[in-house]
Image: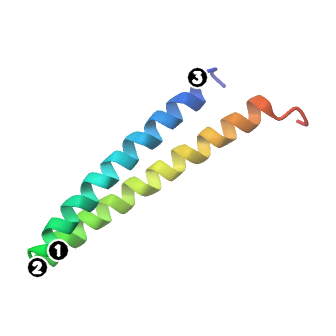
Amino acid sequence: MAKHDGAEHHRQAAEHHEHAARHHNEAAKHHEEDAHEKAGHQAHLAHGHHLQATHHAEEAAKHHAAEHDDKQ
C-alpha cells in the first residue's frame, strides 16, 4: 500500500462532500420553485456523492488501521 493512499482517500472524500453540498443547494432551489422532478434529480446526485465520500472515508480509515495498528 502506498504511503499517501490515506491522504488521497481523504481528498477524494472531501471532494465528493463538496459535490454533494452543491447538489443539495440546487435541489433546494428547485424545490422552492416547485420543480420537484429537478429537485429529486439533484438530491439523487447528492446522495451518490455522499456514498462515494463515505467509501473514500472508509478506505482512509482502513489505510490508517493497516499502517498504525501494532496488533496486526
Residue type (three-letter) at the residue carrying disc 3: His
From this view, report whether residue 17 is shown above or below residue 9: below
The answer for how far apart the CA atoms under marks 3 and 2 are is 45 Å
Q: Nearer the viewer, residue 5 or 10?
A: 10
From this view, report whether residue 48 is shown above or below residue 1: below
The earlier-in-sequence mark between 3 and 2 is: 3
Residue type (three-letter) at the residue carrying disc 1: His
The earlier-in-sequence mark between 3 and 1 is: 3
Label disc, if present, on residue 31 of the rendered structure: 1
The local secondary structure at tag 1 comes to: helix
- Residue ID for mark 2: 34
The answer for how far apart the CA atoms under marks 3 and 1 are is 41 Å
Say left or right for 7 vs 21: right
User: Are dots 1 and 2 in contact, CB under 8 Å?
Assistant: yes
Quadrant assignment for the N terminus? top right
Q: Give the x, y percent position of residue 58.
A: 60, 47
The answer for how far apart the CA atoms under marks 1 and 2 are is 5 Å
Q: Residue at x 23, y 59 (%)?
A: 25
